[in-house]
Image (cartoon, rainbow, N blue to C red):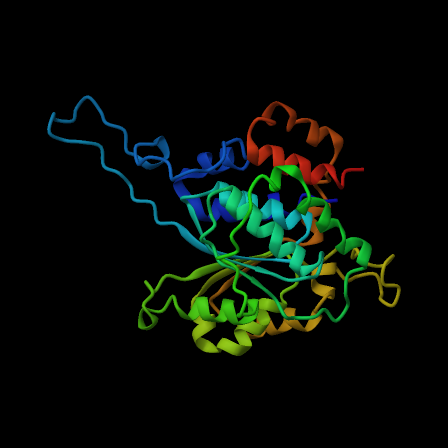
């Protein structure tokens, strides 16, 4: 198992936080308690400290926080939920405006259920969640997909009971993403701000959203951060799907055409950042890493991340 989301999200945070990189680096450790509300404006990262030379009437100037809008597009695996936790831990720097779930690395309905529980647990029950209708061209083995159930039954997640009011029962993830991106337009009542897509599974939902939404959808994508692909290393599916040359990576192989569609339909100036196997192979999940979560066990974020990863450590 590799630390997929940590590399991907720390890259996003480096990009988002700019001059408060030190704070982001600290936050990557997920040491904060359960999120309740945004930190006060007087926190060190957001305030210009006062000096002795200031007059009594002058006060510190507060730098406004302009959160980066993010849609998380995941496929309900263990690493995907860790990514969700990392994003939630970064409020108010990041504003999660939607979560789309593909039943690839797990079963879709189970993935939606776990997502809703995590959002409820961390005070984000207003974030919409939608389930994809896309089917994989090369599906994951069922014993891979069943791992999601291990998370959904955890006592720490079942202290809360989501209302499901934020579950988009009548709208697919593909239609939801296309609509939300269009709604960023001032013509649709939005503020004109673009959205970052953090994708930790196949690109099927984004590909379909771009096809259905057209230019207006692509126009409001700031950048795409995708955990997928393999450039100079072997793939990770040979032992499960023998009919290949050993080069494919799971998130690309699940729906190969979607990768090409996304790259074709995005605007030329849209930034696409890959986190391929070349990078993730370098950071294995080890017992030594997980022992480090022990001193932080009283922190809910760390407790959950350590628990999630403990189910795959070897």
Count the labels in the image: 0
219 or 95: nearer the viewer: 95
Q: Going 62% across and 37% down the picture, which residue do you hit?
A: 156
Q: Is residue 10 visible?
A: no
Q: Going 59% across and 67% down the picture, which residue do you hit?
A: 205
Residue 157: image location, x then y, percent? 61, 41
The quadrant of the picture occupied by the N terminus is top right
The quadrant of the picture occupied by the C terminus is top right
Q: Is residue 280 visible?
A: yes
Residue 234: image location, x then y, percent? 79, 56
Check the image and report above or below for 24 versus 170: above
Residue 80: image location, x then y, percent? 63, 50
Residue 92: image location, x then y, percent? 40, 44
Please indicate whether residue 89 sits to the left or right of residue 57 in the image. Answer: right
87 or 10: nearer the viewer: 87
Check the image and report above or below for 266 versus 166: below
Q: Going 70% across and 69% down the picture, which residue do you hit?
A: 255
Please indicate whether residue 137 sits to the left or right of residue 273 in the image. Answer: right
Q: Going 75% across and 49% down the picture, which residue do you hit?
A: 147
Check the image and report above or below for 272 versus 303: below
Check the image and report above or below for 105 versus 244: above
């Amino acid at each position: 198992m590799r630390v997929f989301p940590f590399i991907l999200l720390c890259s996003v945070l480096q990009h988002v936080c700019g001059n408060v990189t030190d704070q982001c680096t600290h936050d990557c450790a997920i040491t904060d308690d359960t999120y309740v509300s945004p930190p006060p404006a007087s926190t060190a990262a957001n305030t210009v400290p006062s000096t002795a030379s200031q007059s009594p009437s002058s006060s510190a100037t507060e730098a406004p926080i302009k959160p980066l809008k993010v849609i998380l597009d995941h496929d309900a695996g263990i690493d995907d939920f860790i990514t969700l936790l990392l994003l939630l831990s970064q409020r108010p720097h990041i504003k999660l405006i939607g979560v789309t779930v593909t039943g690839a690395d797990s079963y879709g309905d189970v993935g939606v259920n776990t997502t809703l529980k995590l959002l409820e647990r961390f005070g984000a029950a207003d974030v919409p969640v939608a389930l994809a209708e896309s089917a994989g061209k090369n599906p994951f083995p069922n014993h891979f997909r069943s791992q999601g159930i291990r998370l959904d039954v955890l006592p720490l997640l079942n202290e809360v009971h989501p209302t499901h009011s934020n579950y988009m029962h009548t709208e697919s993830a593909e239609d939801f993403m296309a609509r939300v991106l269009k709604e960023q337009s001032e013509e649709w009542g939005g503020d004109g701000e673009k959205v970052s897509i953090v994708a930790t599974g196949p690109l099927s939902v984004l590909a379909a959203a771009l096809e259905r939404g057209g230019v207006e959808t692509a126009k409001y994508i700031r950048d795409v951060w995708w955990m997928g692909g393999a450039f100079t290393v072997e793939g990770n599916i040979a032992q499960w799907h023998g009919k290949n040359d050993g080069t494919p990576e799971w998130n690309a192989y699940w729906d190969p055409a979607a990768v090409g569609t996304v790259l074709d339909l995005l605007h030329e100036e849209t930034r696409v950042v890959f986190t391929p196997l070349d990078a993730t192979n370098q950071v294995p999940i080890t017992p030594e890493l997980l022992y480090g979560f022990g001193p932080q066990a009283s922190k809910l974020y760390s407790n959950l991340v350590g628990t999630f990863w403990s189910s795959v450590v070897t």
